[in-house]
Image (tube, rainbow, N blue to C red):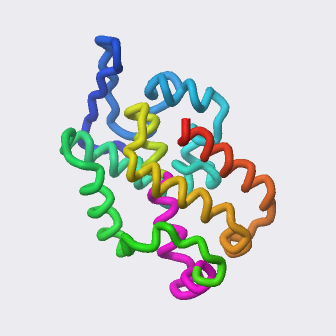
């Protein structure tokens, strides 16, 4: 999945320039030092093929690759533009970020067979972790939305809807993602 873009990232307090052509180039060794510090080497976040990783689910790798291309093409653009464009491209409404009420959440999940709610959450979590790995920080609005998404994903309604069992283990994992993003 090589692309024709290249993102050069200059590390803080360093003259080292890291070149990324796609998200596979971003590893614990090449990611921003703050990401390495917060995640360590063994976090599931680094596994871009693991469904439990914010960068490994159906939406995560596309979000990460899209953000790399966006930053390479528009290094000074607002992340809000990326969010708007990506959600529009995916036909996902940029609404209901604070939806946490169980009944309304169940209705939203049932309304379109979970597509909008779960894809929107997977998108914003992928973006938050992409920013962390590349830039060492998460935009304030992305962080706000990502923390809401983590809270929503940990609800019994969403865990039951996603299925697969292991609800307590998933809640623990989501709390770990929450701690990382808040740091």
- Magenta stretch: residue 9 in it? no
State left or right for residue 176 relative to residue 168.
Answer: left
User: In the image, is residue 27 above or below residue 141?
Assistant: above
Identified at 73% across, 73% down, the residue is 160
Looking at this view, is 53 or 182 the one in front? 182
Res. 25 in view: no
Q: Tell me the quarter of the picture where residue 20 sits.
A: top left
From the viewer's perspective, tell me whether residue 138 is left or right of residue 177: left
How many numbered marks appear? 0
Look at 37% across and 48% down and name the residue there. Answer: 65
Image quadrant occupied by the C terminus? top right
Task: Name the spot of residue 159 as percent of width and height, x first.
Answer: 71, 68
Residue 86 versus residue 19 in the image, above or below: below
Residue 155 placement (x, y as % from top left): 69, 67
The residue at the point 60 percent across, 65 percent down is 152
Pinpoint residue 103: horizontal percent, then vertical percent. Answer: 64, 83
Q: Horizontal and vertical percent for residue 126?
A: 48, 51
Residue range of the region highlighted in magenta in the rendering: 105-125
Figure check: 163 above or below 82: below
* Residue 105 visible from this viewpoint: yes
């Amino acid at each position: 999945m090589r692309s024709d873009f290249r993102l050069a990232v200059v590390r803080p307090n360093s003259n080292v320039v890291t070149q990324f052509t796609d998200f596979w180039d971003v590893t614990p060794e090449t990611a921003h030092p703050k990401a390495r510090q917060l995640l360590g080497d063994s976090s599931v976040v680094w596994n871009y093929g693991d469904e439990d990783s914010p960068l490994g689910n159906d939406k995560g790798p596309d979000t990460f690759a899209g953000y790399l291309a966006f930053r390479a093409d528009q290094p000074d653009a607002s992340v809000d533009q990326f969010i708007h464009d990506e959600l529009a491209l995916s036909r996902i409404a940029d609404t209901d970020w604070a939806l946490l009420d169980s009944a309304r959440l169940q209705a939203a999940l049932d309304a379109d067979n979970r597509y909008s709610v779960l894809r929107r959450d997977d998108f914003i979590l992928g973006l938050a972790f992409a920013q962390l790995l590349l830039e060492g920080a998460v935009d304030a609005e992305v962080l706000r939305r990502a923390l809401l998404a983590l809270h929503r994903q940990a609800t019994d309604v969403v865990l039951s809807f996603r299925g697969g069992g292991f609800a307590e283990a998933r809640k623990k994992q989501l709390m770990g993602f929450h701690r990382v993003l808040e740091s």
